[in-house]
Each structure stands twice: as structure tokens, then as C-alpha cells.
Amino acid sequence: MTARGLRDSAMQAAATLARPVLGGLGFIVTLHRVVPEAERSPLPSNRALEVTPKDLRAMLEYVRQNGLEIVAQEAIPARLASPHGPRFVCFTFDDGYRDNATLALPIFREFGAPFTVNITNGFIAGNASVWWYWIEEILNAGKALQFSWKGTPHHFTAATTGERDRALEEIARLVRGLGAERDALLRVIGEAAGLDPCALTRKLCLTWEELRALAADPLVTIGAHTAGHHSLNRLTDEELVVEVDGARRALAAQLGREVRHFAYPFGGAKAVSEREFALVRSSGFATMLTTRPGNLTREHSAQMDRLPRLTISGNYPALKELRMAESGLAAWRERRRGRA
Ligand SMILES: [Zn+2]
């Protein structure tokens, strides 16, 4: 057996042992995009957001073969308040990418399995930037990117994949650190690169018409994911109301039905805490999802405003990631790394 084979079987054995103790009642999976292998991003921070159609089908097959129940998000409060049935999993996709309708939906239909799509209204309207992919496009187009922000010049070389990835990470830190000023910075970058910050959004994301068609499928739950995908803790209270409650109302009006679920943008411990939880809770959502790692236990029935999720990173084999999530080892590993 190779070293890798040994490591894999040790991991599997650990997952089997951990499952009854750490696996809890079930778990919620965070996904973003379904992208064919040949079209995937070469940059790890964006590639992390992508699983292939083959990966997605393999995950659903695993879930079915191992007796997990795939539940709609709506069912989670009852499953936590009065546990019954097998361990469950709920699949969620964030942001509103078009591939959720063209590639994910047909696969979920094959399995008759429900899933949630959490929508950032500005992505659907085409007036907010999917800046992480847009900056990648800019870095791919030239050998360097330079701009000046608040009197400070920024210069990034982008000749290799490694340089582009480092540049994306540094620019992401700058962008995520801003509140309402974020869009001004994106315009500055757009002017330097000669590219409209929202042009790529309209290519990657659903239109309102496409979203309404997706929402009409009985397998699909639509959740809110704010107006403009800001780092919520960088916004004032007033801005937060617009981003969360305003967006919930606007999305409900577009769909012609109530929107009962919410996912925090960049939902880790650094992006959201008590102030954001309180405001989002006051909007009347039934379940509110973070990206804090964790499996679900009975205790979470009193924490609907901060349910944990487990992210399947496209940088690792999807099935291994799912198995780690199910067993509780993924959450344990993330907490040890201090990401909780
Ligand atoms: Zn998001």
C-alpha cells in the first residue's frame, strides 16, 4: 500500500470511529458553483468554490448509499427540536450562479433531492460585482495590475498562477476590509484595468427570469444572501438594515413568495458576530446560516440565527471532504485550525 493509500484508509477508519460521537444529528453543506473540470479556475481561492458535475453526483450517490437523508432547509428546525430518523444532510449553494440551474438542478432531479440557493440580489440584477472572479479575469488579462487607493499605490505582478493567486488574496483582503466604500475601490480597479466591475456578474449569475424558473422547482428553496454581498461587520446599522431586511423584501417581491431563510456573506467568525446575528434575527427568518464549521446537534435548535455549515472545498477530493464533514472530523479539524 502506498503512503497515500495508508493515509486514506487511516482517515476512513478515523471517520467511522468519530461519526457516532462527533457527527451529531446531521450537517449543512456549503457549495457555490458546479463547473466542468476544463472550465475550473486555476487559482486555489476561486477553485475552492467549484465542484465538478461528477463530484456532485458522487456526493449524492454516497449520501444515498450510506443511508443519510437529504432534507430541505425548511425541515431543519423540526429535525433539531425533536430528533427522529437517520442522520441528515442539507445542501446549500451561495450567491446565485447560473450553473446552479443549468448543472446542479438536473443532478438533484436525478436523485429527487432538495437543495437551497442563497441569493445576493445585486448579482441577479447585475449591479454588484462578483469581484473575486472579476479580479481573476483582470489578472489573467495582463501581466500586472496597478492602481492607487486613498493615496497609496498598489502594484501586483501577475505573470504566473502563483503570482495571480497571491495578488487575488491581497486584493481580497483590501476589498473585504471595506464597508460602503468597497464599490468605489472596485471602480478604481475597474478604471485601471479598463473593465466594468459588473460585466462578469451578468455572465456568471442567474437573471431574475432564470431565478424565478429555478425557484418554481419543488426541490429548490431560495434563501436570502443580502443585497450586495458586503462584509456585514463593516457596515453601519442603517446600511445593515438595507442589506438584510431590504434585500429580503425585494427578493420576496421578485419571487412572489416569502423568503424564510438566510445565509451570511463571508459567514465566518471574522465577518459576523452578535450585532449582525441580532439584526438578521429581527428580520424574521426561520433559519440563518453561517460558515462557522460544525455538525448539528439538539442544542442548535436554540441557535437558528447562527447555524453552522461545512464547506466542501473544490481544492480537495469532494467525496473525502463530504465524508470528513459527515463524521464530524471536518468541523473538529477547522476548529483546531482556529477558523471557528
Ligand atoms: Zn456568498
Image: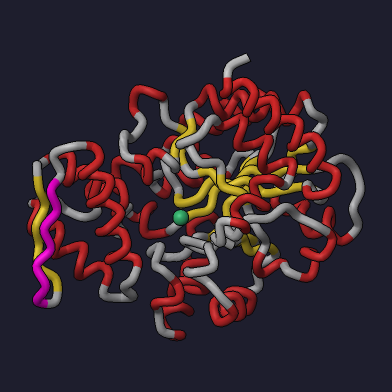
Corner quadrant of residue 123: bottom left
Quick one: quadrant of the C terminus?
bottom right
Q: Residue at x 25, y 67 (%)?
A: 183
Quick one: quadrant of the N terminus?
top right
In the image, residue 83 lies in the stretch drawn in magenta: no
Q: Main secondary structure of the magenta part?
A: strand
Corner quadrant of residue 319: top right
Q: Is residue 20 left or right of residue 180?
A: right
Q: Residue at x 64, y 36 (%)?
A: 322
Give the magenta range. 151-157
Corner quadrant of residue 57: top right
Numbered disc total: 0
79 or 221, which lies in front? 79
> In the rendered view, would you say 319 is above or below 209?
above
Residue 63: in sight, yes or no? yes
Image position, residue 333 (x, y; %): 62, 50
Image position, residue 199 (x, y; %): 22, 48
Image position, residue 44 (x, y; %): 37, 41
Q: Residue at x 20, y 70 (%)?
A: 184
Image position, residue 158 (x, y; %): 15, 44
Q: Residue at x 54, y 46 (%)?
A: 93
> In the rendered view, would you say 79 is above or below 186?
above
